[in-house]
Amino acid sequence: MKVRLPDGKELELEAGATAREVAEALGGRWPKQAVGAIVDGELYDLLKPLPEGAVVQLITKKDPEYQHLFRHTLAHVLAQAVREFFAKKGYPPESVKLGVGPVIEHGFYYDIDAPEPISDADLPEIEKIMHDILKRDLELRRYELPREEAIRRYQGVDPYKVELIQDIPENEPISFYEQEGFTDLCRGPHVPKTGMIPPHFKLTHVAGAYFKGDASRPQMQRVYGVAFRSKEELKDYLWRLEEAKKRDHRKLGRELELFLIDPMVGKGLVLWLPKGNIVREELMRFMREEQQKRGYQLVTTPHIGSLELYKTSGHYPYYAESQFPPMELEDEAYLLKPMNCPHHVRIYAFKKRSYRELPLRLAEFGTVYRYEQSGELHGLTRVRGFTQDDAHIFCTPEQVKDEFKKVIELTLYVFDTLGLKDFRARIGTRDPNSDKYVGDDAHWALAERQIQEAASEMGLEYTLEEGDAAFYGPKLDFVVNDALGREWQLGTIQVDYNLPERFDITYTGPDGEPHRPVMIHRAPFGSIERFMGILIEHFAGEFPLWLAPVQVAIVPITDRHHAYAEEVKKALSAAGLRAEVDQRPERMQAKIRDWEKQKVPVILVVGDREAEEGTVAVRDRRKKERYTAPLAEVVQDLARRVRERRLE
RNA sequence: GCCGGCGUAGCUCAGCGGUAGAGCAACCGCCUCGUAAGCGGUAGGUCGCCGGUUCAAAUCCGGCCGCCGGCUCCA
């Protein structure tokens, strides 16, 4: 057989040759240094036979792909180690059943069905066994089996593997990797010897995971690990993880007294403390102002609605599982509102609408309640009662794209003002094989096209995700990661041809005839709760001046400076700034420390000199140097920063 | 909802069979100080809740509640 090298040279090899033979044919440093190969753009190991005529580029430990190879092998080593771990407890090897063990960002995991639950406390022992397997420098062997034989070998031993084999497409080989009697069904690729795995890994945690991600299937235990090429990388990763935990909005929420979730009030129900509420109010004020500039009108609707309303909208009983159950009275029933849309539709339907009124943009900070599964609740980012910066735009079909673009503009403006640069856009379309969607195909196709065009024309890069649409229409979501890398959806823009139909709303066109409007559902923040959770972590609690609960702390050096400190506060308050004088009987150093810990952006120290000159000593979080300036000047500067909503 | 872990003062944590401790915070007093912790004192807990084992339970066992990590879900 022949293969080609990146430089175009051809190599004649025996049939069934692998990248290892390529390395040997090349000679020189290659037999020693090659760890794998990129074959026609795909990562191969040194063990898998090459396809005829492939372009083969060898890789070494210096290439980034190396990491993928040893992380994958490490997953196998983990599975082998778990078998040894239980063998020591007297269990036979086949009592440890295996699911899948893939490579993930930073490391790997393996899904395991063990005879006894694996707990975090077992991980150090399993790690030790893994290190031992690396030291034994075991050779990996790869081979393929015909389907029937492969199934036969796991029949009655490991039902998970039998099913995984059955899932492999007919045209793909069924390959196994084996080291020291430990064999695993695996498509590879791997490093050829366990000794080639850098010993810089750590098992981080164990968690439950359903087989094949299906909640109706049995649950296995997923053991997670991280692995890097060098000790430094591992240390750095673990350090960054610790740092990230310090940003956790649940921790900062308590330390900075922003919010409280009290089990006595209810799971997933947020109590906003005075300081957190200031941030919340400022964000809402910001959104209100920006929406007003863009032609939105504010409305207010109640927290409940009759069951009939939701039956008409189609939400009930579609989402009965995630709703608080209806409140039933003698001859009527109400639902705590899980969304604001139907209420806004009824405002639209209040009177006959003309095409001249469109687009009609109705906005509301609407609080909704959803009965999220208890295991899903998470600080502010997944709650049971939350406030959407919601709006519904009623427009003609021709206006959809343009309105959609305007919402993208608003969302990007909001993100930009807050310095949120690390987000991705995702367009969710319909899964053509599912029947959970309502509305006709032509509308769906049109809406999906309009969204993609709008995003492209706004220069927005996006990914397409099939099956991610709402049941009533396709959508564009803005997704961010929290401090620990978990993904959360913030802003969302959705096109809906369905609700106007269900509520039979119309507008009168220039032709005097009734026409069906289109609805755009949109919420740039998504929910204020989730947005604040993300924002707290984004700023690590150090809110920009305009959002900071306490913007200025005034620290008098001694008691006799209290009067001047109060004067300073008065000047700041008059300019609309939130300032506090620290009159506690503490040393100024202690006061400064406390305010710094509270992440107050500006601390003003006042003593004899300042009182005499009418100045303040400024300690500004964004500047290294301290400086003294006339009070009036400082007030003016701070007020401007707030007015312009500067990020500092 | 499911799997695993955790739950001791407002916070961070020690104690892990012989009836509860530290630091910080709070409160009181002294100190009046020039840019990240001055000193002394006081008060604060049915050890998440319920039940069991034991002469004796914060400590061991079971159930429940809550939280954490993941899975599933997410209009």
Image: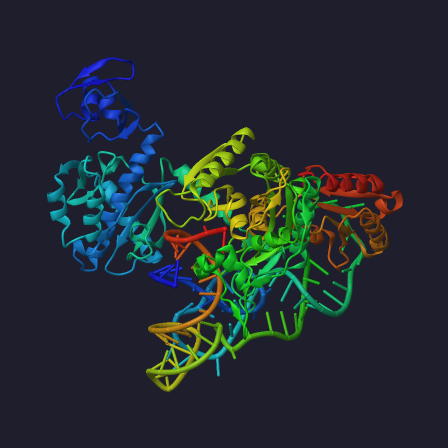
x, y percent for residue A211:
29, 52
B1 over A297 or under it: above or below: below
The residue under the point 21% across, 14% down is A10
Q: Quadrant of residue A30?
A: top left
Q: Along the line of sight, which residue is nearer the eye, A310 or A423?
A: A310
In percent of width and height, residue A38 lies at: 29, 26
Decide which of A50, A445 is in the foreground and name it.
A445
Q: Nearer the viewer, residue A518 or A246?
A: A518
Q: Quadrant of residue A398?
A: top right
User: Most extreme residue toward the right, as rendered?
Assistant: A612
* Residue A28 seen in the current view: yes
Residue lying furthest front in this view? A512
Residue A282 % position (x, y): 69, 49
Tell me the quarter of the picture where residue A302 sits.
bottom right
Figure quadrant of the N terminus of chain A: top left
Q: Is residue A547 visible?
A: no
Q: Quarter of the image containing the C terminus of chain A?
A: top right
- For residue A269, side relative to residue A551 (left or right): left
Please tell me which residue lies in front, A452 or A84: A452
